[in-house]
């Protein structure tokens, strides 16, 4: 059984909807990571796939798409950032970008927002996001668990 078939079978056990099941097809590993990002709510709800599975089967492909697991993360304007496991480091948003950042499990990350950047940060589980808005930009933190330490103009929603 290949990686795609293993993921589809496990997702169906979690109640994957008919639409996703019927459209699954035979995706490449790159496409599977894109599906993970697009269906992140489902994946978070079921803690699926496991962090070990992501590291074992997706490695550098996941990192290139902004999915980090148990690693040091120091990035500037990532297209998206999903921090799984025990990530640490710094994410800087600058310029005219608008980004979604998900800080999960036991990750601890510093997020710096500058210039005209916008940040939509979701904190889960036991994670800790240290958010610094160094400008008049819009910055939102949605706490679904975990902890947020903020400075500057940051709106926190529980």
Image (cartoon, helix red, strand yellow):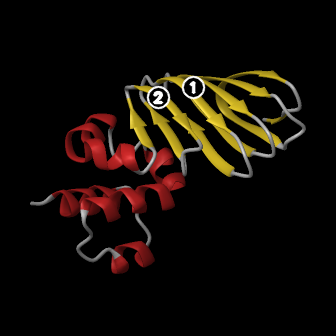
Residue 7 image-quadrant placement = bottom left
Q: Of label 1 and label 2, which has the lower sequence position?
A: 2
Q: Looking at the image, which residue is at 46% across and 28% down?
A: 73
Q: In this view of the protein, which residue sits in the foreground, 78 or 109?
A: 78
Left/right placement of residue 81 relative to residue 32 reads right
In the rendered image, is residue 121 in sight? Answer: yes
The spot of residue 57 in percent (x, y) is: 21, 46
Q: Position of residue 5 (x, y in %)?
A: 19, 63
Q: Position of residue 4 (x, y in %)?
A: 22, 62
Labelled disc at residue 121: none
Q: Residues within 10 Å of mark 2 (few under 14, many from 20)?
A: some
Q: Residue at x 42, y 56 (%)?
A: 36
Q: How many marks?
A: 2
Q: Which mark is residue 90?
A: 1
Q: The residue tagged with tag 1: helix, strand or loop?
A: strand
Q: Is residue 137 left or right of residue 127?
A: right
Q: Nearer the viewer, residue 88 or 15?
A: 88
Are the residues flagged by discs 1 and 2 in contact, CB closer than 8 Å? yes
**Left or right of 154, for residue 106:** left
Q: CA distance from mark 1 to mark 2?
A: 6 Å
Provide residue 146's location: percent of width, then percent of height.
Answer: 63, 24
Rendered image quadrant of residue 19: bottom left
Label placed on residue 73 = 2
The vertical placement of 58 against 17, above or below, is above
Residue found at x 9% / y 60%: 1
Locate the C terminus by quadrant: top right
Residue 105 or 136: which is nearer the viewer? 136
Does residue 119 sit above or below 11 in this rendering? above
């Amino acid at each position: 059984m290949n990686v795609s078939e293993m993921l589809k079978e496990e997702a169906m056990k979690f109640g994957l909807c008919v639409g996703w099941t019927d459209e699954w097809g035979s995706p490449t590993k790159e496409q599977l990571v894109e599906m993970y990002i697009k269906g992140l709510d489902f994946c978070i709800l079921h803690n699926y796939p496991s962090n070990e599975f992501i590291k074992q089967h997706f490695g550098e492909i996941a990192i290139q798409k902004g999915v980090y697991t148990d690693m040091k993360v120091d990035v500037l304007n990532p297209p998206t950032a999903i921090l799984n496991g025990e990530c640490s480091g710094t994410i800087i948003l600058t310029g005219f970008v608008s980004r979604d950042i998900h800080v999960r499990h036991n990750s601890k990350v510093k997020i710096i927002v500058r210039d005209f950047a916008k940040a939509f940060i979701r904190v889960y589980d036991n994670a800790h996001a240290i958010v610094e808005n160094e400008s008049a930009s819009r910055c939102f933190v949605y706490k679904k668990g975990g902890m947020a330490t903020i400075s500057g103009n940051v709106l926190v929603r529980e």
